[in-house]
Image (cartoon, rainbow, N blue to C red):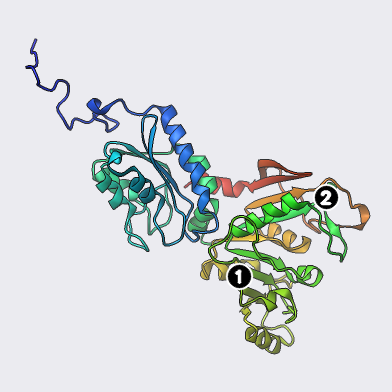
């Protein structure tokens, strides 16, 4: 038996790599439990960028070895450092030989910042664990670049949670139309309130959640009837302060938006878009007045049901860079969008009250959905109210197939 001389290093030669990419002298590879724990830590910090990073995705990152966390980061601001760079900067030289956990595949292109793959390779980390792939054609294939540089790369830890976190971003880059969330405030008998009367259905905690949702979407969409009844501001006034105010969009077929409305009077503070049929009576005159007031009037033809072509509206928003839209319109708008298959997620805020015959039905004229089309994914108590979040089966299938 060959013995090592005194002072001679025993074991595999330096630089020897196990199948998982680890030098046995440096310690055992992380366990599955450690991988899950650190990825969940990365997922927990990613939402700190809500409202601040669009059109980029929410991303969190952790640099760790064993139970020790050396650095934590998240994408905090559009145009600023990405999560991986923040975590690696905090880890410093301790990143060498460690594992980087990141919720989305690192980018490999030059945008507002240099490629994250370059920073990762230079940091000396030996292993990169990625929750899910990036479908954006400008950023994808970062995992392949890391593997070519000799790093051990694993993909799929907490993949479903990472996909749901960035459902809007992933949907847009797969379908090239905005991701749409429908907000509904309902009584127990599925009514939206009293006819032609502005009546708050839910309480203050539900309202706080609505403001958070507004901050997390690029645009807020309502119908012209909501303008006439509520005259809303549609601003985001919650704890999450958006980097830029959400676009306030109106489905206004005959361009009835009043110059005196709160939306028009505040058009200089947050963008206002009015989608209207250019063939409607008096369009040119009304459009000119709204344009002078700072409103962008977007021409959209009508469909066979004499309403605006909603597919064309969605395409116009996508062309203008809207990745996500929160729909807060009334029952007619909700029913039309659901009927056309334009909604991917529903946030139903249910209040403990009944309106009876005097209430406005939530979905007038809408045929019942096929059983299994809408799947409940979250339930939350908000004071006296309850929020139930539903996702459409098509969304879940799209995310599963990425």
Q: Furthest-right residue in view?
A: 357
Q: Furthest-bottom residue in view?
A: 285
Q: Nearer the viewer, mark 2 or mark 1?
A: 2
Residue with the mark numbered 1: 312
Residue with the mark numbered 2: 187
Image vertical order of residue 191 relative to residue 274, above or below? above
Q: Quadrant of residue 289?
A: bottom right
Between the C-alphas of marks 2 and 1, the distance is 32 Å
Q: Quadrant of residue 280?
A: bottom right
Q: Quadrant of residue 125?
A: top left
x, y (%) of residue 321? 51, 67
Left or right of 317, for residue 131: left
Q: Describe the element under mark 2 as helix, strand or loop.
A: loop
Residue at image point 69% right, 83% down:
279
Instruction: Between residue 195 and residue 89, name the one nearer to us.
Output: 89
Left or right of 390, for residue 112: left
Left or right of 288, for residue 111: left
Q: Mark 2 or 1 closer to N-term?
A: 2
Image vertical order of residue 274 relative to residue 180, above or below? below
Residue at image point 56% right, 61% down:
242
In this orientation, does residue 342 appear? no
Residue at image point 67% right, 61% down:
327
Bin the neighbour count of mark 2 within 10 Å (Cα to Cα): few under 14, some 14-19, many 20 and up.
many
In this orientation, does residue 292 appear? yes
x, y (%) of residue 136? 42, 56
Q: Describe the element under mark 1 as helix, strand or loop.
A: helix
Bin the neighbour count of mark 1 within 10 Å (Cα to Cα): few under 14, some 14-19, many 20 and up.
some
């Amino acid at each position: 038996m060959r013995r090592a001389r005194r002072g001679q290093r025993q074991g595999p030669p330096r630089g020897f790599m196990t199948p998982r990419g680890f030098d046995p002298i440096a310690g055992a590879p992380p366990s599955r439990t450690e991988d899950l724990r650190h990825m969940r830590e990365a997922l927990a910090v990613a939402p700190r960028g809500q409202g601040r990073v669009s059109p980029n995705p929410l991303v969190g990152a952790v640099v760790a070895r064993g139970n020790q966390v050396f650095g934590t980061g998240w994408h905090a601001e559009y145009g600023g450092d990405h999560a991986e760079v923040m975590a690696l900067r905090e880890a410093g030289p301790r990143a060498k030989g460690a594992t980087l956990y990141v919720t989305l595949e690192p980018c490999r292109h030059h945008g507002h910042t240099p490629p994250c793959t370059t920073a990762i390779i230079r940091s000396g980390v030996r292993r990169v664990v990625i929750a899910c792939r990036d479908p954006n054609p400008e950023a994808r294939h970062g995992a392949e670049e890391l593997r070519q540089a000799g790093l051990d790369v694993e993909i799929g830890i907490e993949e479903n949670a990472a996909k749901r976190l960035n459902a809007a971003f992933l949907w847009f880059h797969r379908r090239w139309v905005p991701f749409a969330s429908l907000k509904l405030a309902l009584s127990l008998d599925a009514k939206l309130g009293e006819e032609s009367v502005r009546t708050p259905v839910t309480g203050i905690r539900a309202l706080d959640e609505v403001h958070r949702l507004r901050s997390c979407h690029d645009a807020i969409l309502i119908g012209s009837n909501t303008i006439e009844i509520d005259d809303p501001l549609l601003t985001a006034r919650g704890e999450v302060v958006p980097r830029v105010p959400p676009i306030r969009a109106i489905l206004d077929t005959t361009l009835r938006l009043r110059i005196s409305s709160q939306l028009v009077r505040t058009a200089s503070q947050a963008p206002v878009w009015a989608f209207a049929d250019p063939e409607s009576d008096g369009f040119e005159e009304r459009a000119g007045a709204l344009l002078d007031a700072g409103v962008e009037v977007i021409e959209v033809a009508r469909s066979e049901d004499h309403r605006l072509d909603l597919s064309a509206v969605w395409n116009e928003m996508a062309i203008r860079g809207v990745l996500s839209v929160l729909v807060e319109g009334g029952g007619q708008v909700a029913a039309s969008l659901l009927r056309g298959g334009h909604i991917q997620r529903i946030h139903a805020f249910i209040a403990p009250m009944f309106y009876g015959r005097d209430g406005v039905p939530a979905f007038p004229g809408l045929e019942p959905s096929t059983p299994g089309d809408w799947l409940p994914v979250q339930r939350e108590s908000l004071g006296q109210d309850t929020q139930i979040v539903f996702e459409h089966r098509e969304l879940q299938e799209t995310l599963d197939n990425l």
